[in-house]
Image (cartoon, rainbow, N blue to C red):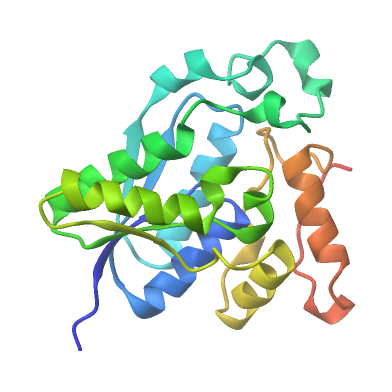
Amino acid sequence: MQRLKSVALVSGGLDSLVSLAQAVRERDVRVVMFFDYGQRAGASERVSVINAASYYDLPFQEVDLRWLRSLAPRGMRDDAEPEDEFDRLDTLTDVWIPNRNGVFVNVAAAWAESFGCDTVVTGFNREEAEEFPDNSRDYMERVNSGLELSTQNRVRVESFTIDLDKREIIRLGRSLKTPLSILWSCYRSGERMCGRCASCRRLVAAVASLPPDERPVLEFEA
């Protein structure tokens, strides 16, 4: 049976990295796509995604969406002031960028159609959907209804992690031999993930909930 051709949308975080790993097994992944939207963690995310593309021997494609930076909260932008370094970035208002995932999936779908691909693979997940509705299955299904009309080949968005929480995603990643050591799930950029922002804390909690022999080796500042 011929496998569906896919564009993998990867941020460098746990969810998109593990979703990519599953896609490599089940889809014909044509390109790993990274968006530069002027995000504070952009430099470290880019390294993570390039490493993922190299690990799976896939083409890397960066897309410039830096106009989104002007819509982002100050603490999430790559031009944040030094004093913002101590912001915890732990509320929805602190990190919300208007329609970010909507922009992402539609841009990726346009590329997918141009590449002759059937699907856009993302890293949505059940845990973050509790706070971010644009991570939910309901959101994905509604997006796909729109894409049926806006793409000639009816590109669909899919996520292999959408029904999982972070703990379950780590376990899936280990079973797929995903290179979890290269991930970047921090809202900041640097040599190590900060360990303090909301994104880091979700990851730290998931790792701590696992038995010691199942915990991936990840480096944090704190």
Q: Is residue 13 left or right of residue 46?
A: right
Q: Residue furthest bottom?
A: 1
Which of the 4 image quarters holds residue 4? Answer: bottom left
- In front: 131, or 36? 131
Q: Is residue 31 above or below residue 132?
A: below
Q: Is residue 59 left or right of residue 24?
A: left
Name the residue located 56 percent from the left edge and 71 percent from the top edge: 178
Measured as percent of width and height from the top left, residue 12 is found at: 54, 50
Can you say which quadrant of the picture contains the C terminus? top right
User: In this orientation, which residue lies closer to the viewer: 50 or 210?
Assistant: 210
Residue 193 visible? The answer is no
**Figure label count:** 0
What residue appears at the point 68 percent right and 69 percent down from the top-left corner?
Answer: 170
> Quick one: 12 or 92, which is closer to the camera?
92
Left or right: where does residue 109 sit relative to residue 121?
Answer: left
Q: Residue at x 82, y 29 (%)?
A: 88
Residue 108 in view of the camera:
yes
| Left or right: 98, with 201 as reference point | left
The percent position of residue 51, horizontal first and vertical second, equals 49, 55
Q: Position of residue 112 (x, y in %)?
A: 22, 52
**In which quadrant will I find the N terminus?**
bottom left
- Viewer-proximal residue among 21 and 161: 161
Report x, y in % for residue 180.
Answer: 63, 64
